[in-house]
Image (cartoon, rainbow, N blue to C red):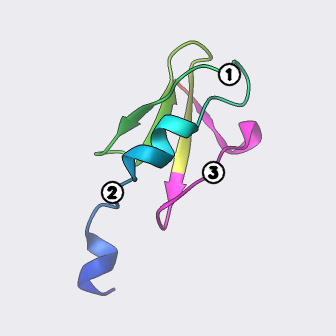
């Protein structure tokens, strides 16, 4: 594993402001520690893999 694999990815604020929860169409909260985008309204956390948000409901984990 390289040094870049160990570092947390940073999401572009412009991209984050454009993303919404696919279930509720509400804003998301970026959890840098868990590398997830959180939708409080739907109770789902969407993973970020290699810097790419995975915005599929079936890939999200329940909070």
Question: Spatial distance from mark 1 to mark 2, Cα to Cα?
Answer: 22 Å
Mark 2, residue position: 10
Mark 3, residue position: 54
Q: Residues within 10 Å of mark 1 (few under 14, many from 20)?
A: few
- Residue 10 or residue 45, whichever sits in front: 10
Mark 1, residue position: 25
Give the percent coordinates (x, y) of residue 39.
53, 24
Residue at x 23% of width, y 82% of height? 3
Mark 1 lies on a secondary structure that is loop
Residue at x 34% of width, y 76% of height? 5
Q: Residues within 10 Å of mark 2 (few under 14, many from 20)?
A: few
Q: Is residue 28 above or below residue 16?
A: above
Mark 3 lies on a secondary structure that is loop
Q: Residues within 10 Å of mark 3 (few under 14, many from 20)?
A: some
* Numbered range of the magenta stretch: 48-61
Q: Residue furthest bottom?
A: 2
Label whose residue precedes the other's in the sequence (3 or 1):
1
Label whose residue precedes the other's in the sequence (2 or 3):
2
Residue 18 is left or right of residue 7, and the answer is right
Q: Quadrant of residue 43?
A: top right
Residue 44 is left or right of residue 8, and the answer is right
Location of the N terminus by quadrant is: bottom left
Residue at x 73% of width, y 43% of height? 56
Q: Residue furthest front?
A: 14
């Amino acid at each position: 594993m390289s040094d870049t694999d160990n570092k947390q990815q940073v999401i572009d604020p412009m991209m984050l402001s454009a993303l919404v929860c696919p279930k509720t169409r509400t804003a998301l909260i970026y959890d840098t520690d868990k590398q997830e985008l959180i939708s409080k309204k739907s109770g789902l956390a969407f993973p970020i893999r290699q810097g790419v948000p995975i915005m599929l409901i079936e890939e999200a984990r329940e909070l």
